[in-house]
Amino acid sequence: MAEKRDYYEVLGLGKNASDDEIKKAYRKLARQYHPDVNKADDAEAKFKEVKEAYDVLSDSGQRARYDQYGHVDPNQGMGGGFSGGDFGGFGDIFDMFFGGGGGRRDPNAPQRGNDLQYTMTVEFKEAVFGKEADITIPRTENCDTCFGSGAKPGTKPETCSVCHGSGQQEVVQNTPFGRMVNRRACSQCGGKGQIIKEKCSTCSGSGKVKKQRKIHVKIPAGVDDGAQLRMTGEGEGGLRGGPSGDLYIVIRVKPHDFFEREGDDIYCEIPLTFAQVALGDEIEIPTLTEKVKLKIPAGTQTGTYFRLKGKGVPKLRGIGQGDQHIKVVVVTPSKLSDEQKDLLRQFAALDGEQTHENEQSFFDRMKRAFRGD
């Protein structure tokens, strides 16, 4: 079994760290390694390690014993040590972020609702210029009949007589190595600390109901593929008067047939004929909003880029717009009339060039070079 790391090392702190420094370090690392955010294979293990370290160091009694004895607490026997408290799932992190404190959680305290995620697909130009839309999401909300208590109207939950509202039972056992105390969820109330004798008929005592909720979404101009919009309080309802979670909308942008986007800049390719690039021309270029004229200088080479300043994407967090970049691609005709062929031969002759019709092919000349001829 791998040896446990020092709890102070896990949180990146010294042994003289204050309670506030411990809490800040935990918040930072818990956000970093939370499995809902971090998809690395070891994220869950690191999150649990951080949670265990915080549970011990945030409790003054446990911290004092840890500072004196390390991971092996003599009061809990040779096989004991610090368990770091009960690890109740990844939702416990929200007790820290939204008002919860250190130590053991009160089962009857208000609890924040879960966050939700919704993937929204938009057109290319909708992402560029912004959009407003209504979406429908399924979510859990507080029951309107019992207002989230789970009890029949006119009644209320009663404090559990076994655990007296703590939600936990303690089993004390004397061993040759000392006195061992085990804590577990109360068998009477299931760890809730309360018992509902007369349940609400609407939610069957859960205090929650499933609903389809319509939400109006405003997508800002300049949003890009993969962007995430946060709508505070639009997640699932909290428990026992706790705040609702948040709704995160992930934006997926459909590709465009003509334009491509890199940051705030727009790119496109314009096909031109040999005559246009050789003699020069003035052409119309489509932009995101209109058509503009672009002068092609005589002798322009294929692959040349032209820039239209301020014709790109509006900056999401700033003033102004990106640019549009146009790449020239010279198109070679695949079919020529006899007259066009004659004119090209005359052009080649005037330029001192020979056509492939009057000389060996490139591949024939390459073969001769390999033979050393």
Image (cartoon, rainbow, N blue to C red):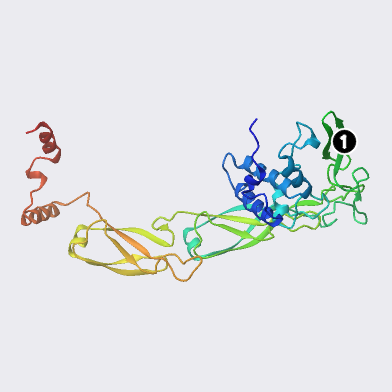
The secondary element bearing badge 1 is classed as strand
**Residue to which mark 1 is pinned:** 172
Q: Which of the image's four quarters has the C terminus?
A: top left
Q: Which of the image's four quarters has the N terminus?
A: top right
Q: Measured from the top left, where is residue 245 in percent x and y?
A: 70, 56
What amino acid is labelled 1 in the image?
Val
Q: Measured from the top left, where is residue 172 in percent x and y?
A: 87, 35
Pick the front one: 339 or 28: 28
Q: Measured from the top left, where is residue 21 in percent x and y?
A: 67, 55
- Is 254 positioned to the left or the right of 208 in the image? left
Q: Residue at x 51, y 66 (%)?
A: 317
Residue furthest toward the bottom? 319
Q: Measured from the top left, where is residue 11 in percent x and y?
A: 64, 48
Q: Is residue 47 visible?
A: yes
- How packed is label 1: few (under 14 Cα within 10 Å), some, or many (20 or more)? few
Q: Residue at x 79, y 47 (%)?
A: 61
Residue furthest toward the top? 176
